[in-house]
Amino acid sequence: MDKKLKEIYRPIEKELALVEERVREQLFAKERPIDELSDYLLGGPGKRIRGALVIFSARAASKNGLKNVQPELSCLAAAVELIHSAALVHDDVIDHSSLRHGKESINARWSNELSIAFGDYLHSKAFELLTRIDRPDILNALAKTAIAMSEGELLQISHRGNFDISTQRYLTIVKKKTASLFACASKAGALLCGNGCSKYSDALERYGLNFGCAFQIADDYLDLVATPHRLGKPTGQDELLGDPTLPLLNLKRGVAEPQATLSVMRSFVQDAKRELLCLKPSPYKDSLTDLTDFITKV
């Protein structure tokens, strides 16, 4: 993990370690093929952004501490990470990706069939974890998010090769496929803190949505300009697959780059930070701002 990211995560270092334990406990089944896949997945250098958002948001929105919800918090953060991991495994199959986080993707190392089945396994394990949290509102939010992510994937695939779509349509796909989980992670953490204050959970949901949009736009931009070493996966894949990302749409329209794409990204970053203003001062609020800046740095 990057040194700067470790510093940002320092206020929740112990809680993130507990999340890792929860994920590991959940995945290993004492069955050789499943455990081999799980061990390979957990050996990658993931950033755990979405799990961190759960914890930071819970702490930033809490008035009375989190001791009474600590076990549920780690389960929630682990479930969010597993939902994300399932989406990545399926994405690699759909996109014919051979690398993920600088090493062979699961579909390249094993097979598409095994990858699809393993992605389903990750998803089911995530929702099994959620049964340990007696919060129908959180379960409902994550169920709706899982639907939105699937819709976003379907829309993206259906628009492949279509560079006539509007920027708004592109953003709809981004909000569903990527930003919805950022938004839900942030909202769910605030809901779990137990204050019953919708002002915080609603603001953090909007923060996460804007952060997620900025994150995806930055990723789409880097796919064009970064090196494979920096991304940990092949670059130029969006153009190869025909995915109409914002930088590609701008290039097709003859719009000057890189400022056109980066301007939109920075607008989402500022909107995300603005939603944090309602929170009381704390190291966790500061970390949410720092995390947004770090992840969207291009």
Image (cartoon, grey):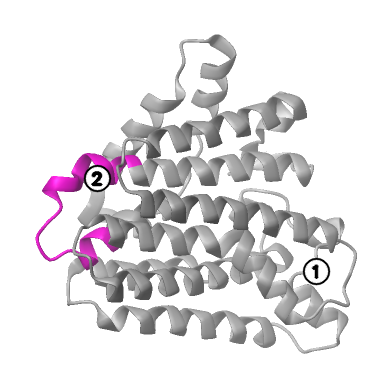
Q: Is residue 267 visible?
A: yes
Residue type, numbered disc 1: Pro
Q: Which mark is residue 285?
A: none
Is the residue marked by circle 1 packed among few (<14), some (14-19), or many (20+) residues within 10 Å?
many
Counting the numbered discs, the total is 2
Q: Secondary structure at mark 1?
A: loop
- In the drawing, does residue 217 fall left or right of residue 256? left
Above/below status of 91 relative to 182: above
Above/below status of 65 relative to 245: above
- In the drawing, does residue 128 fall left or right of residue 155? left
Q: Is residue 6 visible?
A: no
Q: Residue furthest front?
A: 136
Q: Are marks 1 and 2 in contact (CB under 8 Å)?
A: no
Residue at 66%, 31% (x, y): give it.
106
Return the x and y of residue 83 as percentages of the image width and height. Answer: 52, 44
Return the x and y of residue 114 as percentages of the image width and height. Answer: 70, 24
Return the x and y of residue 47 as percentages of the image width and height. Answer: 45, 50
Residue at 28%, 73% (x, y): give it.
200
Return the x and y of residue 186 as percentages of the image width and height. Answer: 38, 62
Q: What residue range appears in magenta?
A: 56-75
Q: Which quarter of the picture shows residue 196? A: bottom left
Q: Secondary structure at mark 2?
A: helix
Residue at 51%, 37% (x, y): give it.
44
Above/below status of 15 relative to 189: above
**Residue placed most toward the observer, 99 or 253:** 253
Queried whether the magenta region covers residue 238, the answer comes back as no
Pointer 1 or 2: first along the chain: 2
**Residue placed most toward the observer, 91 or 236:** 91
Residue type, numbered disc 2: Glu
| Residue designated by label 2 | 15
Q: Which mark is residue 244?
A: 1
Quadrant where the C terminus is found in the figure: bottom right
